Image (cartoon, rainbow, N blue to C red):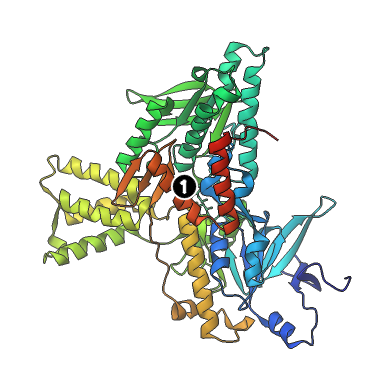
């Protein structure tokens, strides 16, 4: 047994890179075996992260073409769309995770539970760190021929003070802490020693951010309070509890169709979930939230006592991505994500070596140009000269629908354009000059450059890269390490990445909304079953599907598990 190596990697005697760290090399048991020699010569693919993008890549990649090593601080994949359900015990935590070693087994890959710190692009080395058994941070380099960065994002603090008093919802640990705090507050509220005012505060739950995650969490919390509270906490009266959503924009779910945002708001109003729109959190204190709300065109500061706050206000770059962006200097111009070209290659890194996918990345594109192309096509279809064309409000709506389908992230801005258009043309019967419209588009274009940070996009990008790497391997049979990075290989074997928006959905408390770009609908129980079936089908493995089905059945029969750990 002692002859069997415990790791697939070994530290070679060589040190290197700018920090002169030890370099891990692929461990080969028997140098003389032809199989082992082939394994050593295979291109080394290092994948950073075990999220949606990386797992889609791993599931698409053919086994045996590359020597794959996955690096991540967590050893599982997390099915995030259902995470809000785990915060209140509707689903079990284990039903949402799949061990990464089970996923990489198919491609004979290897896993290192560690964190990427930086990349030496010229030597093709990733600096990796992990705490050893004595709690000391150890650093080493991992060499790559192809590096895929899929490290996701962190929560956007928006420069607000006091976020240490908030909860976040990104990981299984976060969900567990939320469940513990919610239950702890309910238990404290039941103590005979808790004064009424304090009881009210403990039972005031605030969600900062009216995007899909905040809305779904508020809905799950509301369901739990309504369905299980009376039975489990009969001392707490329903009207002592309050749930609030603070949203900086005019509507919650503002990237969805306007009718769906309104439906969700009406539903929450009916369920006594308070939605505070056009409100901006200024500071979070241990027992209250300070926020500003516009009144008569002036910002007025208000206070909301709270016992729990979820901070869910969009995404920001991780420290690792900030380091890379800094290293790449002027080639990277986006503050929010690493910029790639349309082949998902990291801009500024040597061509064909490094790719970035999912939330940590953004594909450089110019939506104003796309809009203009749509407009030109429309002019051409109508036999008009695009430069002299005047566009009616009806025609604009037609174009806007096409654009929205391709760029769902533009929904909110398209709505603003609608308003601008209406301002130009009050009775909606006249026309807007094509040039004027283009001007308006260019004005807002900078805000439209990034694709949405969704599992859907990360999944499509991971699959795209998997298919491309398979094509590279089949175009160059017996692929060896030194053959994968010549210029133009990506273009030669595969088309550029194109995002296909399949729609957005959200659970809003015994109801669900669906926005399939151009076609949107909302509804009660039937919609909830549809919502569940879609995610059930997308769940990562047969094992997690069985667990999900068991959780839903268990909940229907016995209610939620209201236990904290
Ligand atoms: P992630 O899935 O976030 O994975 C990043 C991985 O990188 C993780 O494994 C992390 O541990 C690892 N990592 C981080 N730093 C490092 C490092 N330095 N080195 C190595 N590894 C690192 N999207 C939808 O489309 N529909 C939904 O309904 C939906 N609901 C959501 C609900 C919640 C609660 C949340 C939080 C997100 C939701 N999303 C949803 C968004 C979706 O989860 C993300 O867009 C998606 O996870 C992005 O995938 P990714 O692969 O880019 O990153």
Direction from residue 494 to residue 95 in the image, left or right:
right
Direction from residue 228 to residue 29 in the image, left or right:
right
Task: Examine the image and state in which quarter residue 138 appears.
Answer: bottom right
Q: Residue furthest front?
A: 557
- Give the SS element for disc 1: helix
Give the image location of residue 2, x and y in percent. 89, 70
Tell me what residue is drawn at x 45 percent, y 31 percent. Answer: 246
Q: Is mark 1 within 8 Å of ligand 1?
A: no
Give the image location of residue 129, x and y in percent. 73, 58
Quadrant of the drawing holding the N terminus: bottom right
- Look at the picture and state if 45 lies above or below 388: below
Give the image location of residue 58, x and y in percent. 58, 67
Direction from residue 245 to residue 96 in the image, left or right:
right
Tell me what residue is drawn at x 51 percent, y 22 percent. Answer: 304
- Look at the picture and state if 161 lies above or below 551: above
Give the image location of residue 295, x and y in percent. 35, 23
Tell me what residue is drawn at x 63 percent, y 71 percent. Answer: 107
Tell me what residue is drawn at x 24 percent, y 61 percent. Answer: 374
| Residue under pointer 1 | 532
- Look at the picture and state if 406 lies above or below 483: above
- Look at the picture and state if 519 lies above or below 140: above
Q: Residue furthest right?
A: 2
Q: Can the viewer see residue 316?
A: no
Quick one: 347 or 507, which is closer to the camera?
Answer: 507
Quadrant of the drawing holding the C terminus: top right
Direction from residue 33 to residue 310 in the image, left or right:
left
Characterize the local packing of mark 1: few (<14), some (14-19) or many (20 or more) Cα atoms within 10 angstroms: some
Q: Can the viewer see residue 130?
A: yes
């Amino acid at each position: 047994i002692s002859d069997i190596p415990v790791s697939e990697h070994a530290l070679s005697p060589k040190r290197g890179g700018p920090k002169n760290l030890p370099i891990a090399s692929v461990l080969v048991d028997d140098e003389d075996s032809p199989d082992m020699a082939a394994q050593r010569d295979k291109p080394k693919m290092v994948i950073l992260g075990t999220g949606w993008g990386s797992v889609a890549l791993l599931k698409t990649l053919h086994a045996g073409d590359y020597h794959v090593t996955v690096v991540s601080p967590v050893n599982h994949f997390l099915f995030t769309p259902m995470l809000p359900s785990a915060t209140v015990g509707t689903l079990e935590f284990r039903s949402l995770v799949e061990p990464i070693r089970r996923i990489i087994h198919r491609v004979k890959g290897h896993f290192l539970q560690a964190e990427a710190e930086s990349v030496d692009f010229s030597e093709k080395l990733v600096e990796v760190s992990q705490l050893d058994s004595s709690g000391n941070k150890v650093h080493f380099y991992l060499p790559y021929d192809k590096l895929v960065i899929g490290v996701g994002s962190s929560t956007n603090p928006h420069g607000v003070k006091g976020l240490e008093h908030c909860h976040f919802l990104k990981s299984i640990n976060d969900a567990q802490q939320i469940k513990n705090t919610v239950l702890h507050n309910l238990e404290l509220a039941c103590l005979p020693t808790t004064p009424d005012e304090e009881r009210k505060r403990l039972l005031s739950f605030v969600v900062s951010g009216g995007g899909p995650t905040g809305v779904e969490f508020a809905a799950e919390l509301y369901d739990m309070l309504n369905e299980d509270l009376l039975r489990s906490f009969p001392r707490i009266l329903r009207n002592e509890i309050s749930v609030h959503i603070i949203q900086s924009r005019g509507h919650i779910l503002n990237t969805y169709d306007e009718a769906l945002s309104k439906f969700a708001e009406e539903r929450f109003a009916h369920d006594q979930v308070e939605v505070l729109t056009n409100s901006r959190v200024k500071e979070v204190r241990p027992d209250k939230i300070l926020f500003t709300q516009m009144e008569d065109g002036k910002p007025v500061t208000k206070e909301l006592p709270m016992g729990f706050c979820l901070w869910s206000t969009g995404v920001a770059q991780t420290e690792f991505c900030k380091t890379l962006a800094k290293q790449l200097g002027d080639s990277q111009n986006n503050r929010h994500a690493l910029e790639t070209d349309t082949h998902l290659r990291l801009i500024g890194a040597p061509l064909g070596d490094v790719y970035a996918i999912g939330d940590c990345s953004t594909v450089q594109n110019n939506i104003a140009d796309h809009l203009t192309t749509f407009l030109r096509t429309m002019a051409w279809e109508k036999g008009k000269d695009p430069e002299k064309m005047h566009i009616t409000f009806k025609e604009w709506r037609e174009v806007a629908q096409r654009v929205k389908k391709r760029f769902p992230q533009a929904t909110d801005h398209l709505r603003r354009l609608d308003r601008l258009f209406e301002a130009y043309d009050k009775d909606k019967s006249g026309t807007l000059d094509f040039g004027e419209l283009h001007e308006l588009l260019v004005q807002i274009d900078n805000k439209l450059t990034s694709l949405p940070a969704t599992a859907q996009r990360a999944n499509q990008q991971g699959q795209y890269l998997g298919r491309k790497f398979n094509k590279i391997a089949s175009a160059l049979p017996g692929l060896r390490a030194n053959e994968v990075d010549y210029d133009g290989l990506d273009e030669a074997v595969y088309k550029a990445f194109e995002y296909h928006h399949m729609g957005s959905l959200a659970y809003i408390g015994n109801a669900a909304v669906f926005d399939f770009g151009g076609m949107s609908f909302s509804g009660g129980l039937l919609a909830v079953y549809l919502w569940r079936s879609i995610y059930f089908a997308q769940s990562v493995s047969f094992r997690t599907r069985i667990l999900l089905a068991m959780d839903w059945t268990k909940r229907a029969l016995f209610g939620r598990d209201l236990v904290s750990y």
